[in-house]
Image: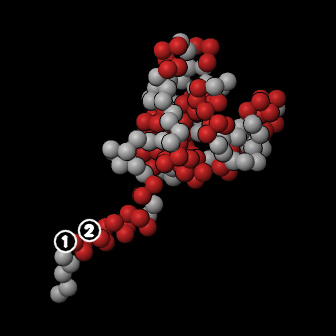
Amino acid sequence: MFALRPFTLSILAGFVALSTGCALTPTASTQITYENTIRHLIEKQCFECHGSKAPVMSEFKKDEKGYEAKDIGPRMDTYEHLIVMINGSDTGAIMRRLDDGTHTKNGKPGNMYKNLGSNDTQRAANLSLFKSWIGSWNLKRAKEMNDEERKSILIPRN
């Protein structure tokens, strides 16, 4: 019978992790940033409706209903476009839309939570990455936030 040595098993496990895409997920000791994690996640899960062909937020706001009818949301293809929905003119929009229902009054998830993955495990893992990256997870709008709450939002780029 063929037996694998421990060293061979660890190399095999490393190859499997690389081939399944787990290498993009930072380890517990690595800080989650836009560049090392979030950008890849958004490209994979959100670009169909929020890619480079989507309107910037100011343009989207002019015809929200029209864009939504076409399943097009505001542009999120760069760090600058994304942070508008976290701590900019549309503060908290990402958190409200991606929340799993834990922070809502009615317990219902945000309208984009379902797009975080193809199953509950993937959605929970990807939501956890967003929460770690953002730091302060609250669903408030810009006018509802105080300075301390704004300062607790992390969103590191690199």
User: Residue at position x 76%, y 48% from top?
Assistant: 53
- x and y, in percent, of residue 138 in the image: 50, 24
- Taking depth in this image into account, of 108 and 97 the one nearest to the observer is 97
In which quadrant of the rendered view does residue 55 lie?
A: top right
Q: Which amino acid, by three-letter code, is at mark 1?
A: Pro
Image point (73%, 32%), residue name: 57
Residue 106's spot in the image, x, y percent? 51, 24
1 and 2 marks in contact (CB < 8 Å): yes
Q: Nearer the viewer, residue 37 or 106?
A: 37
x and y, in percent, of residue 45 in the image: 58, 50
Q: Quadrant of residue 92?
A: top right
Rendered-image quadrant of the N terminus: bottom left
Residue hosting label 2? 10
For marks 1 and 2, give the CA distance. Answer: 6 Å
Disc number at residue 90?
none
**Figure check: 39 above or below 16:** above
Q: Find residue 82 and report its horizontal and vertical position in percent.
A: 62, 37
- In the rendered image, the vertical position of residue 83 relative to residue 10, given as above or below: above
What numbered label is drawn on residue 6?
Answer: 1
- Above or below — where is 151 with respect to 109? above
Q: Secondary structure at mark 2?
A: helix
Q: Under tag 1, what secondary structure? A: helix
Q: Nearer the viewer, residue 55 or 96?
A: 55
* Amino acid type at image mark 2: Ser
